[in-house]
Image: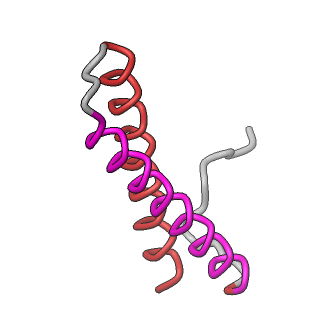
Amino acid sequence: MKDFRKSRGGVSIDPELIRRGERQLLSEISLLEQWLKALRSTPEKSELNRDTINSYQDMLRSRQDMLAILREQAKK
């Protein structure tokens, strides 16, 4: 029977691809931070506003996690 488990060897990723991914993630993080700042400074505290802030916070955390993983991969 064939063994489909992942090998323990590392995966090589083109350094230019890593740099472009990092730039893209940094751009998205910056944009999300700007949107969150604008939403938080809005006097309106509606449910829609809170839900939007929560969504953007989730997206921001996701991008930050992806960036950390990408940077870790770049070290390998």
Image coordinates for residue 43, horizontal then vertical, percent: 25, 31
Against 49, residue 16 (above or below) is below
Magenta stretch in the rendered image: 16-42
Residue 11 lies in what quarter of the image?
A: bottom right
Q: Quadrant of the N terminus?
A: top right
Task: Judge by depth and name the residue closer to the eye, 20 or 32.
Answer: 32
Task: Judge by depth and name the residue closer to the eye, 41 or 57.
Answer: 41
The answer to whether residue 71 shows anywhere in this view is yes
Residue 4 lies in what quarter of the image?
A: top right
At 38% from the left and 38% from the top, the residue drawn is: 58
Task: Judge by depth and name the residue closer to the eye, 43 or 40.
Answer: 43
Image coordinates for residue 12, horizontal then vertical, percent: 67, 78
**Going by the image, does 54 lie left or right of 30?**
left
**Going by the image, does 49 lie left or right of 8?**
left
Against 67, residue 36 (above or below) is above
Magenta-colored stretch includes residue 10: no
Image coordinates for residue 42, horizontal then vertical, percent: 30, 36
Residue 18 lies in what quarter of the image?
A: bottom right
